[in-house]
Amino acid sequence: MRSFGYAWEGVVYAWRVQRNFRIEVLLGLLAVGLSLWLGVNLVPVLLLTALILSLELVNTALEALTDLASPVYHPLAKRAKDTAAAAVLLASLFAFLAGLWLFLPPLLARLGLS
Ligand SMILES: Nc1ncnc2c1ncn2[C@@H]1O[C@H](COP(=O)(O)OP(=O)(O)OP(=O)(O)O)[C@@H](O)[C@H]1O
């Protein structure tokens, strides 16, 4: 229970300081709502949402560690932060493509456009 509490503190911290994390939580909820509405398989939506939120949490942790290790500018600190941010970006791009693939056909059908 104590470990769970510490992990939850991490989630609360990311929610408080990371605007991107808040946006990703809201987009994840939107995707879940959309898949329920359109009758799309919920499993890939939940997995992709979990992937992006988890990567954002790891990115937040790496940012904190980088700031601790290198409070002043250092090229390696830049590499660490940029690469961790790239992980979130890549996952988000692929999730966006998967979302188009999953949602577009049933959405167009629901709106009577196909
Ligand atoms: N100590 C540092 N040394 C070198 N470059 C840094 C350092 N700190 C930040 N940077 C550069 O500035 C960019 C922005 O860093 P910052 O800490 O503001 O994170 P961020 O990417 O804006 O994340 P977020 O907005 O999600 O907190 C980094 O991606 C990196 O390129």
Image: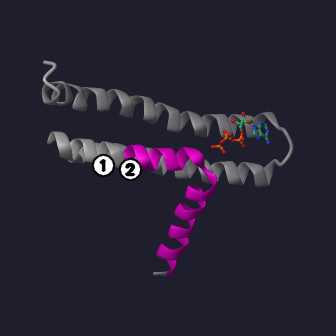
**Ligand 1 is located in which of the four quadrants?**
top right
Please state which of residues 101 and 76 is positioned toward the viewer in this rendering. 101
Dividing the picture into quadrants, the one containing residue 100 is top left
Query: In the displayed image of the protein, which residue is found farthest to the bottom?
Result: 1
Q: Quadrant of the N terminus?
A: bottom left
Q: Is mark 2 within 8 Å of ligand 1?
A: no
In the image, residue 39 lies in the stretch drawn in magenta: no
Residue type marked 1: Leu
Query: Which structural element holds mark 2?
Result: helix
Spatial separation of the CA atoms under disc 2 and disc 1: 6 Å
Residue 70 visible, this orientation: yes
Query: In the displayed image of the protein, which residue is found farthest to the front?
Result: 112
In the image, residue 22 lies in the stretch drawn in magenta: yes
Name which residue lies at 76% across and 50% down.
67
Residue 41 lies, in percent from the top left, at 17, 43
Please state which of residues 43 and 20 is positioned toward the viewer in this rendering. 20
Query: In the displayed image of the protein, which residue is found farthest to the right?
Result: 72
Residue 12 lies, in percent from the top left, at 55, 64
Q: Which residue is mark 2?
A: 50
Q: Name the magenta segment's main secondary structure.
A: helix
Query: Which structural element holds mark 1?
Result: helix
Q: Is mark 1 within 8 Å of ligand 1?
A: no
Please state which of residues 95 and 37 is positioned toward the viewer in this rendering. 37
Instruction: Determine whether, in the image, residue 53 is placed left or right of residue 10.
Output: left
Residue 41 visible, this orientation: no
Q: Which residue is mark 1?
A: 46
Instruction: Determine whether, in the image, residue 110 is placed left or right of residue 65.
Output: left
Q: Give the residues in magenta.
A: 2-28
Dividing the picture into quadrants, the one containing residue 94 is top left
Q: Quadrant of the C terminus?
A: top left
Name which residue lies at 27% across and 47% down.
33
- Disc 2 vs disc 1: Cβ atoms closer than 8 Å? yes
